[in-house]
Amino acid sequence: MRARIHTKTSLTAAARRGLEPVRASRAPLVLGGDHPLSRVAMLVRVAAWLVAATSGAAAVGVLGVAERRAWGIRLLCAALVVELTLLMLFALARQLQREHVLRLIASGRARLPAGEIAREARRLVTPGHRAHLAERLERALSEAAFWHQLPVASRPPPGIRRLCGFAPEVRAIAGQLRSGQPALPGVAQLELFLTGGYGSALYAGDEDLLREHLWRIRYLICPAAPAGGAHQDD
């Protein structure tokens, strides 16, 4: 009986998550229609509806192919090409939406009554996600320390070597994520710092920019942290 209830609950939760992109966002009501999050939320919703529509067209194409109709394969191919393009647009819009939400949370606005913000805040505070962020940060420090020993094909940009000069800050942030009570704005700021792949500030090779980011992250995660930071040249 409990297993059935758990299964039904899981299916309901999955259905709700699947419908999230097509639901109207409260961001325009809370932040105003001109806010970047409001505009991106609208783009996400439109893209989700278009993906659903093209999926329906693809299904009709499949039926046409099954019945050996001449138009079936043409409709299916066209629908798949359009759907692939829309899925790429949808993924990009969702990433932009998440980044805007993270900026709001990092600025201390996690309690705004918008579903996107509430969902992201819940994700950030889970121990598993905090541990994942700590691992990513520590992996970056390891790559910086052993950069010359890594195979050339797998080396990150050389700018990451600057991170070696901020090892105490990196370890303090990772330790707070794992064993402390990290403040939500700091976790959001760290995720923003790690977002963007090789285009992020982590790989820019700019000492001052790196110091500024790490100081802000440490301060937000643990406000009692000292303002200064260790640094050494390569």
Image (tube, rainbow, N blue to C red):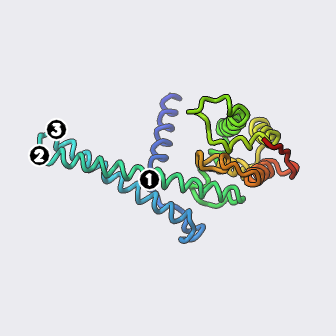
**Comes first in the chain, label 1 or label 2:** 2
The quarter of the rendered structure image containing the C terminus is: top right
Mark 1–mark 3 Cα distance, whole angstroms, equals 30 Å
Mark 3–mark 2 Cα distance, whole angstroms, equals 11 Å
Image position of 107 (left or right of 93): right
| Residue with the mark numbered 1 | 90
Query: Residue 39, relative to residue 93: is it above or below?
Result: below
**Comes first in the chain, label 1 or label 3:** 3
Q: Position of residue 173 (x, y in %)?
A: 77, 42
Going by the numbered disc 2, the residue's amino acid type is Ala
Q: Quadrant of residue 65?
A: top left
Rate crowding at label 2 as few (under 14), some (14 to 19) or many (20 or more) other CA atoms within 10 Å.
Answer: few
Mark 1–mark 2 Cα distance, whole angstroms, equals 31 Å
Q: Secondary structure at mark 3?
A: helix
| Residue with the mark numbered 2 | 70
Q: Position of residue 51 (x, y in %)?
A: 36, 52
Q: Quadrant of residue 68?
A: top left
Q: Nearer the viewer's eye, disc 1 or disc 3?
A: 1
Residues under numbered marks 3 and 2 in contact, where contact means CB atoms less than 8 Å apart = no
| Residue with the mark numbered 3 | 66
Q: Residue at x 11, y 46 (%)?
A: 70
Query: How many numbered callouts?
Result: 3
Query: Residue 105, relative to residue 64: is it above or below?
Result: below
